[in-house]
Amino acid sequence: MDLPRLWTLIRGDLAKARNSLPGDAVSHEALVEYQDFLDHNELELACDMLERYAEDQNVTPVFWLALRDAAARMEQPERERRHQRRAEHF
């Protein structure tokens, strides 16, 4: 798969996770940084910021499954398994 297509798919996964969050989350520091990293195509760091947001917020299984999919596409199996476990604990 060519990189631009892969990046598009990962961005879609990250957007799905982000879109599962409440509207007021936009002002959270981690999500401000998420957007900055996303704007610079730093997809792994953008994923890190979504995870950071979730550390102290209630998120849905949809959030974790979307991050799992992004991790799978980025070939990060440990992160992929961690997100799968978090999705299953709801």
Image (cartoon, rainbow, N blue to C red):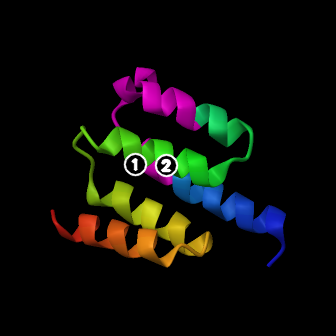
Residue occupying the point 44% across, 25% down: 29
Residue 34 position by quadrant: top right
Image side of residue 61 versus residue 79, left or right: left
Residue occupying the point 60% across, 34% down: 35
Residue 17 place in picture, x, y as percent: 44, 51
Q: Which element type, helix, strand or loop, lies under badge 1?
A: helix
**Gap between marks 1 and 2 measured at Cα:** 5 Å
Q: Which element type, helix, strand or loop, lies under badge 2?
A: helix
Q: Is residue 34 above or below residue 59?
A: above
Image side of residue 71 versus residue 58, left or right: right
Query: Residue 48 — which label?
Result: 2
Residue occupying the point 24% across, 38% down: 56
Residue 85 in magenta stretch: no
Residue extent of the magenta highlight: 16-34
Q: Is residue 77 above or below residue 36?
A: below
Instruction: Tell me the quadrant of the picture where the N terminus can be found.
Output: bottom right
Residue 10 place in picture, x, y as percent: 62, 61
Q: Nearer the viewer, residue 10 or 52?
A: 52
Residue 4 place in picture, x, y as percent: 82, 62
Q: Is residue 84 above or below residue 45?
A: below
**Can residue 29 be seen by looking at this rendering?**
yes
Q: Nearer the viewer, residue 21 or 3?
A: 3
Which residue is labeled 1 in the image? 51
Instruction: Tell me the quadrant of the picture where the C terminus can be found.
Output: bottom left
Q: Look at the numbered discs 1 and 2 and tell me whether their residues touch, using CB distance below 8 Å.
A: yes
**Can residue 20 be seen by looking at this rendering?**
no
Residue 30 position by quadrant: top left
Q: Is residue 80 above or below residue 67?
A: below
Q: Main secondary structure of the magenta part?
A: helix
